[in-house]
């Protein structure tokens, strides 16, 4: 199945730093979703994007739907230790059904 | 809040056993999904269902079957478990089609080990 290219694969940062990660695809998507997965848990939806160019925030998180509809990024500002986890992007292709394509994840580690 | 629950957090089974993984959602969602998650491979779709008694193959359906007899419940069945089916299994659901209704909500996962 198709996968999205998500980068970086992992990041190790200091508490208080800002973080940026992105996803790119060869296909056009009409929806981008960002999830966070804590160890041993299922992914939790953070932000949903539905329009090209859309910029949406959720607390310290900000995500954007790329103008080309083939990419999206997620920023986390002023990171804290509980931001640790794996962040996944997911895109929906316009196939008439809500099948999502997932990125391979960015593992974030935050040092206190 | 949407709640998606899975019957077990951890399961250990033997090769050849028949395994049932149950998923229940409490928000009257139309669509339900089963994924497996493996390191380096991300989430891969096994099967999905858009209505009671309806099912569609995902990207990796081999070795699995599903059952959706009631709207709120979607079961994943391993007819004869094999060691390569050791994985984290995630269930998800969505309200329906259309913008804003297709955000997938996930259960906590079932970590299955096949010995």
Image (cartoon, coloured by chain):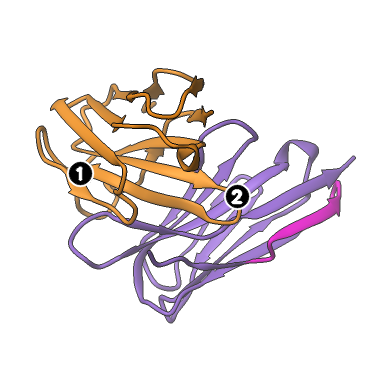
User: Residue A6: percent from the left, percent from the top?
Assistant: 58, 66
Q: Nearer the viewer, residue A22 or A75?
A: A22
| Nearer-N-terminus badge (2/1) | 2
Name the residue beneath numbered marker 2: B39
How many marks do you count on the picture?
2
Q: Colour of chain A?
A: purple
Horizontal relation, residue A43 to residue B44: left or right: right
User: Residue B96: percent from the left, percent from the top?
Assistant: 20, 44
Residue at image location 61% in from the left, 44% down from the top:
A59
Marks 2 & 1 on one chain: yes
User: On screen, A40 above or below A32?
Assistant: above
Residue mark closest to the camera, 2 vs 1: 2
| Bounds of the magenta segment | A7-16
Q: Secondary structure at mark 2?
A: loop
Residue at image location 29% in from the left, 55% down from the top:
A99
Q: Quadrant of the N terminus of chain A?
A: bottom left
The residue positioned farthest toward the top in the image shown: B7
């Amino acid at each position: 199945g198709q996968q999205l290219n998500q980068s970086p694969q992992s990041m190790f940062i200091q508490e208080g730093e800002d973080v940026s990660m992105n996803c790119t695809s060869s296909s056009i998507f009409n929806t981008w979703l960002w999830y966070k997965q804590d160890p041993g848990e299922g992914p939790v939806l953070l932000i949903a994007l539905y329009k090209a160019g859309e910029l949406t925030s959720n607390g310290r998180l900000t995500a954007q739907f790329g103008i080309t509809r083939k990419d999206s990024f997620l920023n986390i500002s002023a990171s804290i230790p509980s931001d640790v986890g794996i962040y996944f992007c997911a895109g929906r292709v316009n196939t008439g059904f809500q099948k999502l394509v997932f990125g391979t994840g960015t593992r974030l580690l935050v040092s206190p | 809040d949407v709640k998606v629950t899975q019957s077990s957090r951890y399961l250990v089974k033997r090769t050849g056993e028949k395994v049932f993984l149950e998923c229940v959602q409490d928000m009257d969602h139309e669509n339900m999904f089963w994924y497996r998650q493996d390191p380096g491979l991300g989430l891969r779709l096994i099967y999905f269902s858009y209505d009671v008694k309806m099912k569609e193959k995902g990207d990796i359906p081999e070795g699995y079957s599903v059952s959706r007899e009631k709207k709120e419940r979607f079961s994943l069945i391993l007819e004869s478990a094999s060691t390569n089916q050791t994985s984290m299994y995630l269930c998800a659901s969505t309200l329906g089609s259309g913008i804003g209704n297709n955000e997938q909500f996930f259960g906590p996962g079932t970590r299955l080990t096949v010995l």
